[in-house]
Amino acid sequence: VPLGQAARFGKNFFHRLKSRYPLQSFRQIGTFLCSFPIGKRKVTAVAHISSLKCRNIYSVALARQLPDCFPDAICMDGDINNANNAVNMKVAKAQHQEYLQALRMCIPVLELPALSPEVLGTDDIDDKDNIAGTKYYPDCVFVEDTVVAIGQYALVTRLGHPSRRGEEKHVYEVLKQLGMNVINMNDYQDSTEWIHDVAKKGGETATVDGGDVLYTGRHLFVGLSNRTNMEGATFIRHYFTSYDVIILPQLNVAGTTGNPVPLHLKSVVTHIDAGTLLAPVGLIGDRFLEAMRAKDLDYTVYRLPDSLSCNVVSCNGQVIVQNTSCQKSMRILHDAVMESDQDLICVDTSELAKKDGALTCCSVLLEA
Ligand code: CIR
């Protein structure tokens, strides 16, 4: 076919395809047939949806303000007196605002107030043994960990770290108000009504941090970690029955020293689109690739030297990435995002990173 004709054919084809299947619906990977006339001929074309990019999937992002007690948030280093962990609240707040601003370029943001005594109400404070003195959920800005949401369904999590349990309550209420189908893992601790096996065998101990759960549009990856256990992963599998749930082994095990230890799966592995993933160079990334190969999963994986850069927020055609001094990571990221035909937005969240906060952890993208 002459080039001009092929180009017209392609244009025509996509036009037809878009009008038949709004881009929002391109979440399902598959093959579509489309017939239309070119001149006097009727042409049938095949589109492999895996090659198209997901756009305008999400309708609202949930975020939460940074609490004043954020400097007391947990960090893996543990020593809050370590000067490297000391948070400059003024900078942290400005960076958080910059992050929300970047997010607003892709999606409306519903910003919940930070959890304070007023917001929590006295009942909640009285029955919370994890609220010490004036510290009210210093980690509550990391809303991602409180929920796993796909389509109209959301699972509010039982958080892995005891000091964070309770952060999820308001999120549950908000998701309900948004009209989502939502269940709270915390309500099923000894219930046998549903999720039978899980509730019986592991319900009491099942924990999940949303940061360990990555939905690429094709697979639902659950990374085991110090926060997400097998019972938690099984809970997810029982709840999201119509998705292909892939449980990944813990990435930060003995032998991975020398690499920064990731708190969550998504601290080091995220997706750019339904066929493209980011993973770090080194043992942790190797372990992830091994697990993918064992399952025979077909993704293009870009490996970045700077593991922090592997955590990106892909939202409605834009990819938000963290500023990095690692030029090589930036170049690879740039190429990957261009290849995916999306836009790149850079933000600096270095103060949040002092408390192990990644980019994804400060929001939950909803299709509500
Ligand atoms: C924590 O240890 O739970 C918080 N300081 C950091 C949580 C970050 N969450 C995330 O990356 N999904």
Image (cartoon, rainbow, N blue to C red):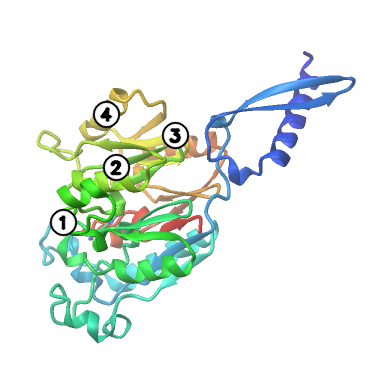
In the image, 123 versus 314, the foreground residue is: 123
Q: Residue at x 38, y 57 (%)?
A: 348
> 195 or 324: which is nearer to us?
195
Q: Which residue is mark 3?
A: 276
Which quadrant would residue 352 be assigned to in this image?
bottom left
Amino acid at dot 4: Ala
Do tag 3 and tag 4 residues touch (Cβ < 8 Å)? no
| Tag of residue 222 | 2
Are the residues at dot 1 and dot 4 in contact (C-beta closer than 8 Å)? no
Dot 2 or dot 3: first in sequence order is: 2
Please tell me the numbered disc located at residue 361: none
Numbered disc in front, either 2 or 3: 2
Residue located 49% across and 64% down the image:
179
Tell me the element at label 3.
strand
The tally of labels here is 4
Q: Which mark is residue 204?
A: 1
Mark 4 is surrounded, within 10 Å at the Cα level, by few (under 14), some (14 to 19) or many (20 or more) other residues, namely: some
Q: Is residue 244 above or below residue 64?
A: above
In 3D space, how far apart are the residues under numbered discs 3 and 1 (Cα atoms)?
A: 36 Å
Label 1 neighbour load within 10 Å: few <14, some 14-19, many 20+: some
State left or right for residue 197 relative to residue 272: left
Residue 173 at what x, y percent from top left? 38, 70
Looking at the image, tell me whether mark 1 or mark 4 is earlier in sequence order. Answer: 1
Question: How far apart, in angstroms, are the residues tagged by discs 2 and 3?
Answer: 17 Å
Mark 2 burial class by Cα count in 10 Å: few <14, some 14-19, many 20+: many
Q: Which residue is mark 4?
A: 291
Q: Nearer the viewer, mark 3 or mark 4?
A: 4
Q: CA distance from mark 2 to mark 1?
A: 19 Å
Q: Is residue 261 visible?
A: no
The secondary structure type at the circle numbered 2 is strand
Residue type at mark 3 is Thr
Front in this rendered view, residue 190 or 159: 190
